[in-house]
Amino acid sequence: MNFIDSQQAFMAHIRDPKLHPKPDGIEDRRMAIYRDLFFNNISGFISSGFPVLKTLYSDEDWSKLVRRFFAEHDCQSPYFLDIAGEFIAYLSNDYELQPSDPIFMLELAHYEWIELDVSITQTDPQECAITDQLTEAALYLSSTARNLSYQFAVQHISVDFQPQHPSEQPHYFVVYRDTHDDVQFLATNAMTALLLSIIDSTPSIQLPALIAQVAQHAPQFTPEQLFQGATATLSAMAELGVIVTKNHA
């Protein structure tokens, strides 16, 4: 067995010792040190990143969940700060819900992870506050803001509140980093979510074009009503730094 094969056998055993036997010639006591070290590090990061989700499991079931992630998911980033994001990617793409998993598992995990995601995102240096008239600005969703909706009331989930069915209406949030670099959560509504979604998908859009797109989704409102509502909402979002413009000089 060459060196690369030895490394692969070593890591396969570390990740899933029940499926992959330890490489020959290595004392099990030594291998146990590596097994515990690697798994406990991963488990610690996952547990600290998803504290509410963890409280909904028994210790045994939580350990099984983290073990499955550790054994089955090939992380695309070598950085510890990205482990929580890799966990979200695993739950979203490869994981099948188990009997011990709450139905809202993925949404709650995403809600818990988004705070870390926003806190470590690099600010686009071209972004600047909207100081001119809103009607003339090219609008962008800030690189440190996220426009979100969930089918479950994730903000209220706890050991004592575990909904078994989605809510009748979505729950909308903006998560953003304020001027003090603190992460803030703001409950919004369907119209605000629509405005921010269009800005996010159409960078540099201006207010008249934005209102024209909104009118296609909300024909029950007059252009004057849409203008007044959008101006008030976007002015508040601009003050918070959720929407910005860019300096391309």
Image: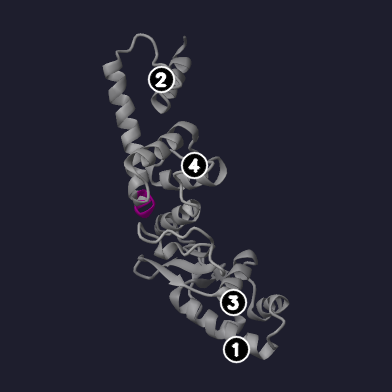
Q: Are marks 3 and 2 in contact (CB under 8 Å)?
A: no
* Residue bearing mark 2: 10
Q: Residues within 10 Å of mark 3 (few under 14, many from 20)?
A: some
72 on left or right of 230: left
**Secondary structure state at the residue bearing disc 1:** helix
Which structural element holds mark 3? helix
Q: Which residue is mark 1?
A: 228
CA gap between label 3 and label 2 equals: 53 Å
Q: Alpha carbon of mark 3 to alpha carbon of mark 1: how far? A: 13 Å
Check if residue 52 falls in the magenta segment: yes
Reading the image, the residue beneath label 3 is: 191
Residue 24 appears in which quarter of the rendering?
A: top left
Specify the segment rendered in magenta. 50-54
Quadrant assignment, res 42: top left
Give the residue type that dot 3 points to.
Answer: Met
Q: Position of residue 224 (x, y in %)?
A: 66, 90
Name the residue rendered at 63%, 86% in the picture: 227
Q: Eyeballing the image, is 153 above or below 135?
A: above
From the viewer's side, name the closer residue of 176 and 126. Answer: 176
